[in-house]
Image (cartoon, grey):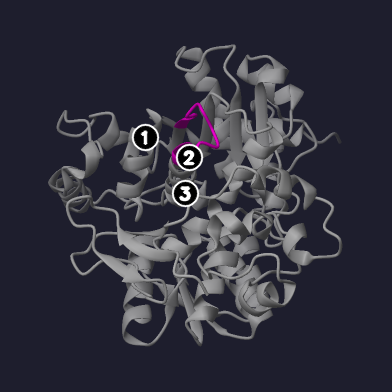
Amino acid sequence: MQDDAYLKCIDPHCGLEYPIMSTNVECEKGHLLDVKYKNKPSDKLKKTFYQRRDSQENIFNESGVWRFRELLNFCQIDTENVAECSKYLVSLDGSEGRQSKPYQMSKAAEFIGISNNKLWLQPEGYNPSGSFKDNGMATAVTHAKMVGAKKIVCASTGNTSASAGMFAANEGINCDVYIPSGQIAPGKLSQAYQFGAQIIQVDGNFDDALKQSLDDAKNHNGYTVNSINPFRIEGQKTIPFRALEYLRWESPDWIVYPGGALGNTSSCGKALMELYEWGWIKKIPRIAVINSEGASTLSDLYNGEFEGEELRWNKGNTNTELISRYYDHLDKEGIRPKTKATAIQIGRPANILKGLRALEFTNGVVTTVSDSEMLDGMAVVGLNGFDCEMASGASVVGIKKLVNEEIIKKDDVVVGILTGRQKDAMLPVEYHNNPKNKFAIPPKN
């Protein structure tokens, strides 16, 4: 193994470093960590990645994550040695990220109000467990395996539990899943049960479940696979890698995500920072984060809707006291995140600082959309023959809102990420049974 990869605190005033075998998710001062690489990868790898699309029966070439393994080689292995890849890299037979790429969807473009050739939507729901989580779970569980973890632990609003359970079952390790009781779509919960995960129900919301899961990981030899784990962020970087590769490494003007725990925002920001530093891209796409109106923490803070101050990364000088006061305000007023889009029903995004860093680097924006708007976004994607869950509809209607506000220009190239497929069977049924909904196709008697 080469000595190339290590962990580093994201706070530029701290900068504490740890060996790659560390299982810390924070430095000793409580700051989040990044996986860092000393060596700069050659952009000649772009050709290698393209050639790997003909996998030659190598599952690591088939994988939409491990196809880019040189850009996330924290295992520090010979990436062309199949035996070494097989020993270290965790994969669901190459299926994670394999079907993920951007598509043009004409009905969605018409609904948004931009030209079809300017809009790309990338469905991550075609991952094996049905969401983007498999991208990061492949890398998180790879590190868990590296350090000899016997149990992985997560909190979940649904998709994380499905992905963690699937990978744990495939690797033959235990999996504890902390869920907010009664706040998880049955279709997602059933997957966690199906894959043999131990479900622990928490009286509270996702934020309460995350706190308990981190205590479990810390005190009972668990390995946390939520997105505060820096190795999960590494796998999620491949979402923008695939989009950029499909666009021949010509940066779009925008990349748009639903905003929940902000792992996707963080991973996209890290990917773009690295690619720009390496000279792989010349233009930095802007990131747009779309919150639900009922879970609007980032939007409230970023746009100055709480106490009038706009929260920023500010080169690492973030006003974390403002965040604390906002959370105290939520507690005092008894405000809990509430949206039918349970995947983004998160009030205390664990990756808020990394998310702010990503927004600063990309000159990003944050906005909110309503539940009814998200349902319209979900429905119009379905009318193009693609499947997505309600939270993914946030990307579609978020783009529409930003186009209407002329923040996104009509000639901008936009990539919207559809984070998961539909697992709440009654949402489309209820939507289409109500003839008042914009895209409803009610049943006939």
- Give the labeled residue for mark 1: 361
Local crowd size for mark 3, using a 10 Å CA cut-off: few (<14), some (14–19), many (≥20): many
What is the three-letter code of the residue carrying label 3? Ser
Q: Where 408 sits versus 261, above or below?
A: above
Q: Residue at x 34, y 67 (%)?
A: 25
Q: Secondary structure at mark 1?
A: helix
Circles 2 and 1 in contact, beta carbons < 8 Å: yes
* Disc nearer the start of the sequence (1/3): 3
Residue 358, quarter of the rendered image: top left
Q: Where 395 sits versus 70, above or below?
A: above
Q: Is residue 325 visible?
A: yes
Q: Secondary structure at mark 2?
A: helix
What is the three-letter code of the residue carrying label 1? Phe
Local crowd size for mark 1, using a 10 Å CA cut-off: few (<14), some (14–19), many (≥20): some
Between the residue at mark 1 and the residue at mark 3, the CA separation in whole angstroms equals 12 Å
- How far from the left and from the top, in percent, is residue 361? 36, 34
Q: For the magenta stretch, what is the residue range?
A: 276-287
Question: Left or right of 164: which side holds 444?
Answer: right
Between the residue at mark 2 and the residue at mark 1, the CA separation in whole angstroms equals 9 Å
- Give the labeled residue for mark 2: 272
